[in-house]
Amino acid sequence: MPRVPMVGTKIAAFAVLVISLSLLGCAGQQGGMSAGMANDASGGKTGAALFKQRCASCHPNGGNVFKAEKTLHKAVLSANNLANADALVKYVRKPGQGMPKFSERSLPDPEARKIAEYVLKTF
């Protein structure tokens, strides 16, 4: 029986992990309101609730599970010209390699803005 090199096995395991985390993030994008989701004064979800639903699986506590240096902390966002809500909303529409794209259809502007404002206020 041929031996499978350890490097190939580790790469395969990492690929399964990445795909699983991506699917978990996508599942959160499709779900409805869960019992723990808070609403704002207008009856919509708060920025915190939207962040928890759509972003926290990859950005727990403002971190980044895929690129540790690309956190959501103010200094990092500023260094990457993402220091305001408009810039963050624009970025999630075309984020580049490593982050899924959030179209206006999948994440409407009002929700994207709430998330951006929450990120800027919280991290």
Image: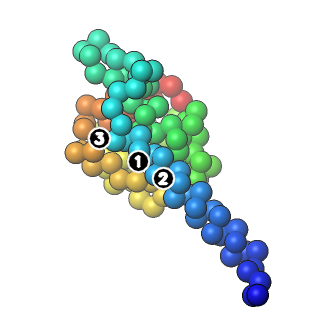
| Mark 1 surroundings: few (<14), some (14-19) or many (≥20) residues within 10 A | some
Give the position of the C terminus as an image quadrant. Answer: top right
Amino acid carrying label 3: it is Leu
Q: Residue at x 63, y 69 (%)?
A: 12
Q: Position of residue 66 (x, y in %)?
A: 58, 53
| N-terminal-most mark, 3 or 2 | 2
Q: Position of residue 91 (x, y in %)?
A: 36, 48
Q: Report, in whole angstroms, how far the alpha carbon at label 3 lies from the one at label 1.
A: 12 Å
Quarter where residue 115 is shown: top left
Q: Label 3's element?
A: loop
Residue 22, numbered label: 2
| Mark 2 surroundings: few (<14), some (14-19) or many (≥20) residues within 10 A | some
Q: Is residue 117 left or right of residue 64?
A: left
Residue 26, numbered label: 1
Q: Is residue 33 visible?
A: yes
Q: Position of residue 4 (x, y in %)?
A: 73, 80
Q: Nearer the viewer, residue 66 or 24?
A: 24
Please name which of the two marks, 3 or 2, marks the residue nearer to the observer.
2
